[in-house]
Image: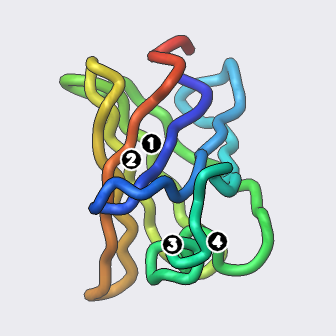
Amino acid sequence: MNMIVLMTAAGAPLAMLGLSTPVAPERSCIFMVHPQITSAVFESKEGKIVFPDRPTEYPCSYAKVKGGTGIAFTNQNGWRFVVSIGKGDEGTWKASLADDSVSGRAFSPFGDGK
């Protein structure tokens, strides 16, 4: 799995999370703007959390877990991201900071190739 598409909870395209290969369980990951993102989504709460300032590469954990794959990292503003992708290449993402959180849908368009 080298790329994961993140969408808002309503299903609007938000970002692509690129992951380095082939080293697991630790990889580097970076958010890229999804080519179909709208200005409203970019300016939304989710957009401001995913794209807080400038593109930054994050060290992220990558692990096979029961029922799929789990990826986790913390961005430069302290938001903790957890992405869960099931065996069907679909899943969820959640970002949390203290008592605040946002979440949405996720999928891996290219499957689970390491």
Q: Earlier in the sequence, mark 4 or mark 1?
A: 4
Tell me the kind of residue under disc 1. Answer: Ile
Q: Earlier in the sequence, mark 2 or mark 4?
A: 4
Residue 71 circle label = 1
Tell me the kind of residue under disc 4. Answer: Phe
- Residue 21: quadrant of the picture: top right
Residue identifier under label 4: 51
Residue 83 circle label = 2
Q: Are marks 2 and 3 in contact (CB under 8 Å)?
A: no
- Residue 46: quadrant of the picture: bottom left
Q: CA distance from mark 3 to mark 1?
A: 23 Å
Q: CA distance from mark 4 to mark 1?
A: 18 Å
- Name the residue furthest top: 113
Q: Position of residue 67 (x, y in %)?
A: 20, 23
The residue sitting at 35% across, 24% down in the picture is: 89
Residue identifier under label 3: 41
In the picture, measured across the screen, residue 29 lies left or right of residue 110, that is right
Q: Are marks 3 and 1 in contact (CB under 8 Å)?
A: no
Q: Residues within 10 Å of mark 3 (few under 14, many from 20)?
A: some
Q: Is residue 62 above or below residue 113?
A: below
Tell me the kind of residue under disc 2. Answer: Val
The residue sitting at 53% across, 19% down in the picture is: 110
Q: Position of residue 4 (x, y in %)?
A: 52, 37
Secondary element at image label 3: helix
